[in-house]
Amino acid sequence: MEKIILRRKADELGFFHCGFSKATFLEEEAPQLEAWLKMEYQGEMHYMNNHFDKRLDPRLLVDGAKTVISLLFNYYPQEKIPLEGNFKLAKYAYGEDYHHVVKDKLKQLVTFMKEEIGDFNARIFVDSAPVMDKVWAKKAGLGWIGKHTNLVNPKKGSFFFITEIILDVDFEPDVPMKDYCGTCTRCIDACPTDAIVAPYQLDARKCISYATIELKSAQLPDSFQSNMDDWIFGCDICQDVCPWNRFSTPHNEPLFEPHSALKNFKKKDWEELNEVSFREVFKKSAVKRTKLEGLKRNIAFQKK
């Protein structure tokens, strides 16, 4: 199967970039991951300690794996939720949960491939398994990993989801892209909690996204006091200030549009959220991950 045919179908399904890399052991990344874990930068994301070998070798996830196909799916919103004097959500959480939306599209792509070339062994991944998605996307020539540790594409910025298909079919690998961050340090300078402890190095324990989503304690650490900038689910600061995101363009996925009520939410509406309204507004949203209790915790912390 020619890559151009696969890319054309991926484009039809809404993916704006598709690249290929050889499924092999990530020799360069192994000591980097080990050092990051030893520094305990993962905080309470204990799952990061699991499946160390699988994170570094896709052949342990798919028998006979030969290729990792990486795809990017835009989520930059057409209409932003009002931020002035309001609590803030990360842009990726405006609409329906991306895990389901994008996974359905990947399934369609795999079905198309099997119709074209016959059956093969494959698994699809949407931020749902021990896969180093940014590394594979970089290897596939889809962008470079910026100093804020997000993947940056020179034509689209960084507001996109990274997904993979790992399969036992050979494709010619693409060429990685060079790093174009240069001397820029805007992401590092803008982070209110100093979570980017060095270029290309994130201490998740200091990250607002980690605090508002991953941290499950009843109370947020005092170190975040006065630094949250009204973020209650995720944070986009390091991406918002990145010069490459001037090239971000709105997505065209209807399922990523925010719930109509969310467009008019003010701080008072957030503070008065109850279980009924939470379930209605965030019924299919990634925000459900924090549950109402977690969201209320994040809101209350801002008012201290």
Image (cartoon, rainbow, N blue to C red):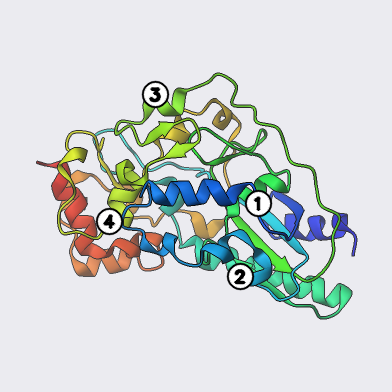
Label 2: state its secondary structure: helix
Q: Residue at x 69, y 49 (%)?
A: 16
Horizontally, is 257 left or right of 267 in the view? right
- Of marks 3 and 2, the one in the foreground: 3
Q: In terms of sequence position, does the residue under pointer 4 or pointer 2 come before the other? A: 2
Label 1: state its secondary structure: loop
Nearer the observer, 161 or 56: 56
Could you tell me how far apart the alpha carbons at marks 1 and 2 are, in whole angstroms? 32 Å
Q: Quadrant of residue 22?
A: bottom right
Residue pushed farthest right? 2
- Of marks 3 and 1, the one in the foreground: 1
Where does label 4 land, which residue?
215
Q: In terms of sequence position, does the residue under pointer 3 or pointer 1 come before the other? A: 1
Where does label 2 land, which residue?
104
Up the image or down, 275 lies above or below 136; here it is below
- Of marks 1 and 2, the one in the foreground: 1
* Image quarter of the N terminus: bottom right
Q: Residue at x 52, y 68 (%)?
A: 100
- Label 4 is placed on what type of residue? Leu
- Label 2 is placed on what type of residue? Asp
- Label 1 is placed on what type of residue? Glu
Q: In terms of sequence position, does the residue under pointer 3 or pointer 2 come before the other? A: 2
Where does label 1 land, which residue?
27
* Image quarter of the C terminus: top left
